Amino acid sequence: MIPHLYSVVLAGGSGTRFWPASRKSMPKQLLAIGPDPDCLIAATVRRIETLCPPDSTLIATGAHLLAATRRALAWLPDSSFLGEPVAKNTAPCIAWATWEVLARDPDAVIMVLPSDQHVGDPESFRRALTTAVETARGGVITTIGLEPTRPETGYGYIEAGGERGPGVRRVERFVEKPDRARAEQYLASGRHFWNSGMFFFRADAMASAVRRHLPDVAAALDAIARLPVGERARATASAFEAFPSVSIDYAVMEKADELAVVVASFGWSDLGSWETAWELADKDPRDNAAPPEAVLIEARGNLVRDLRSDGRRRVIALVGVEGLCVIETDDALLVLPREQAQDVRKVVEELQRRGSSERV
């Protein structure tokens, strides 16, 4: 365990990218869609248990997801769960969590982690986190940059400068998602790394940054902290209504005087679509990822998931097809080419247009 270390796991989400398995009330972090048998958020919390004990782990989620998230993380105490009353992006949420941690430990160092990512090499992951925590303890807000393995256009990048120490470099700037040509330049440069969305900082340093760059948010959180405990929930809900919807990257990170980045590689995936679920899954000799009862004849490169809750597996047969995702739940069946996996959002949009709220 690392003394004075707290983790804040961000667990929001709208449940669109993994429809029909994911819904507004069941976003992807609550699903077991990666190689791990646990749902993604449970795997995330288990992964950091040797660094940060349960009573120092906070889960920041939407108020409407609190019950489901508590069920997924039943071993955590009730004090671990923060129900965000209104989704206002990451800056207000992280600021709120920082004030909560400061009330418990003025000497705290916080690591902010996404709840819905896959890590193939947990030991390397924990080593990178330890390096980032120790760098942040010195007062510099720190992030993790992932060594790119392909010219990815779907991720933001971090441009790194000179070394600050072993495996740690200065952040020159954050870079938005590039086009293909620029992504290829980034891959070849050796200076650009995927933005992991992980942040590490001393709680007092983040509070100072929020006071400087989001003074209205800081003032509201100060006022809430002075209230009796029984009055804070209502005041928090009112404050969140007025908070700006802004990311921590834009509100704080890009304006900081100095940032550090730990360069790492630990088999990371953002699990952003059914395509990435197929990439990480065990496959047969024809690259199909399917349950044992599936019948696959002259089929190649398909993903088949039977996610019905009754436990009764029906036979799903694929004949002469290639590169499909076939996903079945209790009330829906999705079939689409793997290469169009991102287009599942269009299904959700169409269902919303039709008023089929029970399906999204």
Image (cartoon, rainbow, N blue to C red):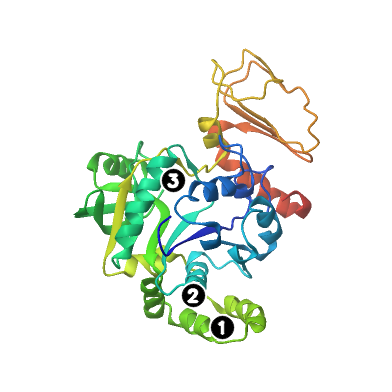
Q: Are marks 2 and 1 in contact (CB under 8 Å)?
A: yes
Earlier residue among tags 2 and 1: 2
The residue that mark 3 highlights is 154
The residue that mark 1 highlights is 224
Q: CA distance from mark 1 to mark 3?
A: 38 Å
Q: Secondary structure at mark 3?
A: loop
Relative height, residue 225 to residue 65 (above, below): below
x then y, percent, for residue 284: 56, 18
x then y, percent, for residue 293: 72, 20
Relative height, residue 325 to residue 346 (above, below): above
Earlier residue among tags 1 and 3: 3
x then y, percent, for residue 72: 66, 50
Question: What residue do we see at 62% from left, 40% from top?
Answer: 32
The residue that mark 2 highlights is 99
Residue 67: image quadrant is bottom right
Question: What residue do we see at 78% from left, 33% from top?
Answer: 311
